[in-house]
Image (cartoon, rainbow, N blue to C red):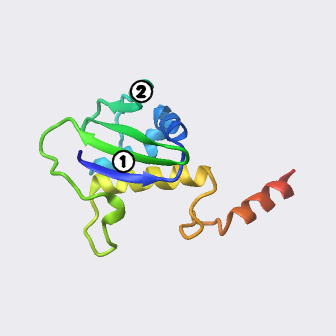
Amino acid sequence: MHAKIGINASPQRLFDWLAQGANARHWFAHLRHEADALPEVGVTADAGAMTVRWSAAPAGEMHVTGQGHASELSLTFTEDGHPPEAPAEEQSPDDPPTNAGNALRSIKSHVENAEGGDPDMHTPGIVSKEQVEEAAREME
């Protein structure tokens, strides 16, 4: 296993989000140094195995496990040259950033925000879930 992270969302919700190829733009750029021009990622999803694979370099796969509202997402590169990493949540702010860790944290941020988010990690411009709900009511 190359890298992993815990995510506060059901395994099915996480897998469904990952299986949508358009969502690759949120995490794939973190795996590459030239993030300005992303190639066609080539995402394929295997619902039975709860695994998402991509063919663009650096090719790899992500596997979803868990139950209830707790998931674990593991990322494995299928190309050589990528040393194993500690789980992303075990890294401190003083540790140097890693491409895989950044990609997993981006997925965590997007998926958890879709389910209300972590109250201590706000999306820029959004202070709380209550403010989002209030803004939605005002727009109606």
Q: As drawn, which residue projects farthest toward the front?
A: 67
Q: Quadrant of the N terminus?
A: top left
Residue at (46, 47) in percent of width and height:
71
User: Looking at the image, is 138 positioned above or below residue 55?
Assistant: below
Asked which quadrant contains residue 113, the reply is bottom right
Residue 14 at x, y percent in the picture: 50, 41
Residue at (79, 54) in percent of width and height:
136
Residue 45 disc label: 2
Residue 36 visible in the current orientation = no
Residue at (84, 54) in percent of width and height:
139
Residue 125 at x, y percent in the picture: 63, 66
- CA–CA distance between discs 2 and 1? 19 Å
Residue 137 visible in the current orientation = yes
Left or right, residue 66 beside residue 91: right
Task: Look at label 2 and name its amino acid.
Answer: Ala
Left or right, residue 3 beside residue 118: left
Tag nearer the camera, 2 or 1: 2
Residue under numbered circle 1: 29
Secondary structure state at the residue bearing disc 1 = helix
Residue 15 disc label: none
Task: Look at label 1 and name its amino acid.
Answer: Ala
